[in-house]
Image (cartoon, rainbow, N blue to C red):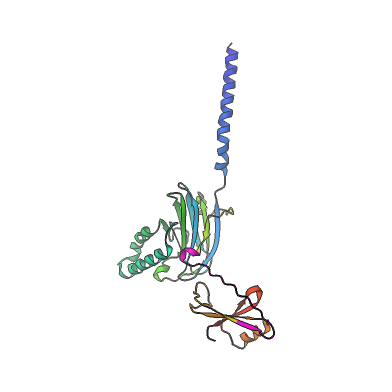
Amino acid sequence: MLHTINSHRAASIAILAALLCACLLPGIPAFAQQPAVQEIQGGINPGEIDVFRLSGLQRGQTVYISMQTTSGNLDPALAIVPGNTDLVKLRADYTAELQQLVQTAQHPLAELPGLRDRYFLAWDDDSGPGYAAALAFPVPQDGDYILIASGSLSAAGRSTSGRYRLILGVDAPEVLSREAVPTGTTIATPDDSLLGLHPRIQEVAGSLDSNTPTTAFNLYGLESRGCPLCGGTGYQRRFAADPGAARLRRQTGAVGPPAGRGAAGVPGIYLPRGR
């Protein structure tokens, strides 16, 4: 009788153990899953900022970000704002307040953190090695956020520029120690439209032949965002049917800026408007 009871007890324990394993097994892959890590290479010219949309973050997650310079004298800075922020207005307001702070405050650097705290959910300047920026952002609620990458104090007129390496990880603290390995996951997506920079596309059809070896188009409303040929005015792009003719114009000084490539690989030349 005792043997039978023990047998039933052993069977019951075995069943309970099996049920417990069945309940726990689905959770094991989640714990073993490698944290998402993304690497972005970019560059910032004086006065520029790069913006990225962080989509679908969940409350309770922590986003770790580091930004280090790979060339130039760039002093990296990072900031995060809500996904529905009007960046054009925020940038204008922040720049105005920062410039006023620099001009009027007795100790501007001491008051700068308070200004940044009012505008950003999280920010960092020099927490990484050297001048590198690094931060950990606990996500306060589900939704999208905006990451701002810039040069430190660029809004105050401090001119630093160069290439950078940006590493982001969700629940991956090793990002801050530079030990994180990119997993191919997309966490941040570049989005210049947040700065009011919307793409403008126009198609023009035409032909070039021996009777009409060149044609020209005026380019209006260009801004000097990383474009050494665009001084904020109109430029003219000329397409040549004969590459030799294009080279001859450059050699004889008929054009100023260097040649580019036109549509379908046709050599193109930038000319200041009116020349």
Q: In this view, which residue lies farthest toward the front?
A: 205
Foreground pick, 34 / 214: 214
Give me the residue at 58% from left, 16% from top. Answer: 6
Q: In the figure, is residue 253 to the left or right of 67?
A: right
Give me the residue at 45% from left, 53% from top. Answer: 136
Give me the residue at 46% from left, 58% from top. Answer: 146
Q: Position of residue 213 (x, y in %)?
A: 66, 84
Q: Position of residue 9 (x, y in %)?
A: 57, 19
Which image quarter holds the C terminus? bottom right
23 lies above or below 167: above
Q: Position of residue 19 (x, y in %)?
A: 57, 29
User: Is residue 57 located in the magenta-colored stretch of the structure?
Assistant: no
In the image, which residues are magenta? 192-215
Q: In this view, which residue lies farthest toward the right?
A: 210
The total number of labels drawn is 0
Q: Position of residue 256 (x, y in %)?
A: 56, 84
Q: Is residue 195 visible?
A: yes
Q: In this view, which residue lies farthest toward the bottom?
A: 252
User: Is residue 209 located in the magenta-colored stretch of the structure?
Assistant: yes
Which image quarter holds the N terminus? top right
Q: Name the magenta segment's main secondary structure.
A: loop
Foreground pick, 217 / 231: 217
Q: In this view, which residue lies farthest toward the top?
A: 1
Q: Is residue 177 visible?
A: no
Q: In the figure, is residue 120 to the left or right of 244?
A: left
Q: In the figure, is residue 95 to the left or right of 32?
A: left
Asked which quadrant contains residue 215, the reply is bottom right
